[in-house]
Amino acid sequence: MNVVNSGNLRPLKAGWRALLALMWLAAAGPAMPLPGHSAPSEDQIAAAPSAAAAKTAISPLKPGLRVALYHGPGTGGKGPPNLKQQLNDGTRSSVREVSPEEIRGGVLTNYDVVIFAGGSGSKQAESIGEAGREAVRQFVAHGGGYVGICAGAFLATSGFTWSLHIIDAKTVSPKWKRGRGDVKVELTDKGRGILGERAGQFDVHYANGPIVQPAKEPSLTPYVPLAFFRSEMASNDVPVGVMVNAPAIFAGDYKQGRVVCVSPHPEQTPGLEGIMPKVVAWVAPQPGRANK
């Protein structure tokens, strides 16, 4: 039987010590890099999401949520594709485009929420027709959720013969072409509870969205501001001084359903992609509220 002498054990022990040192360095994380690797910068460390944060980040959308996105005359641009990207959440929620013909045919009874995005509110109203507008009203009245962004917010209001009259708001002026660009917005306490904590003022893209005041329709409950405009855009001879402190995002009940109107475009603003999923989650039918 061959016996290894003690002198031959030294290289083996040294090899194990080196291996254990490398294993310890690897386990120590990015603050202690392996030999031959540079340590990440503080900016890189701050930008990387932690494992704990990844595990606790829960989608606000409930499993199986069905969202109908209006697709037809009066809508277009970057809004609808951005919304589909932000709201399609695997098995939790799905977004499908629906046509004016489908809306008139009663397709909304298969969904939890309907969204009318940016474009032209009057063209959307004309496209779906009175039968389609009544179908939307009945959908919300029986517990469905309605989200209107810019043109879709105009459509929801109560100040036009063609609008849905599902929220107690009307525009302060028929002159709507205020301009396009970034404006300052600030959430209310109620808005932070629904849309997430965001302190102070922040920039959001704006493109001629409605500036509203109460319509005071007896059949409707007052709307609740979720965010206010804190700066103004006033091109094309529109009234000046009416936009600052006017509601930028506002919510209300229509019979058994919920309505949220969004005048600017968070879905088109980098860094605000999480707002619309929270809006949709809030208007969606909830336990204890009537469903369709």
Image: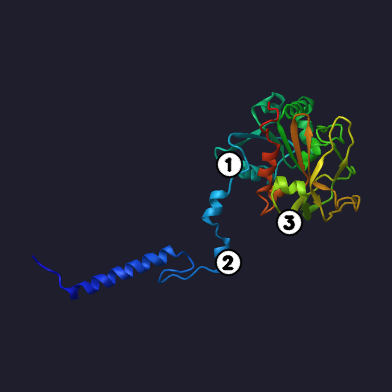
Amino acid type, mark 3: Ala
Of tags 2 and 3, which is closer to the observer?
3
The answer for how far apart the CA atoms under marks 2 and 3 are is 23 Å
Q: Which of the 4 image quarters holds residue 58?
A: top right
The image quadrant that residue 259 belongs to is top right
Residue name at image x 89 percent, y 31 percent: 218
- The disc placed on residue 249 is none
Give neighbour class at mark 2: few <14, some 14-19, many 20+ (Cα, 10 Å): few
Structural crowding at the residue carrying mark 3, measured as other residues with C-alpha within 10 Å and reported as few (<14), some (14–19) or many (≥20): few
Q: Residues within 10 Å of mark 1 (few under 14, many from 20)?
A: some
Q: Which residue is mark 2?
A: 43
Quadrant where the N terminus is found in the figure: bottom left
Is tag 2's residue or tag 3's residue first in the polypeptide sequence? Answer: 2
Which residue shows up at 31% across the image and 70% down it?
Answer: 17
Identity of the residue furthest to the bottom in this view = 7
Q: Position of residue 217 (x, y in %)?
A: 89, 33
Q: The disc labelled 2 sits on which kind of residue? A: Asp
Residue, disc 3: 199
> Which comes before the other along the chain, label 1 or label 2?
2
Q: Label 1 belongs to which residue? A: 89
Q: CA distance from mark 3 to mark 1?
A: 27 Å
Quarter occupied by the C terminus: top right
In the image, taking residue 167 as reference, residue 93 lies left or right, namely: left
Instruction: Give the structural element (helix, strand or loop) at label 3.
Output: loop
Say which residue appears at 58% left-offset and 34% top-offset. 64
Horizontal and vertical percent position of residue 16: 29, 68
Query: Would you say the residues marked 3 and 1 are in contact, meaning their CB atoms lie under 8 Å apart?
Result: no
Which amino acid type is shown beneath numbered disc 1?
Answer: Asp
Expressed as whole percent of the image width and height from the top left, the position of residue 265 reads 73, 48
Between 140 and 155, the one lying in front of the other is 140
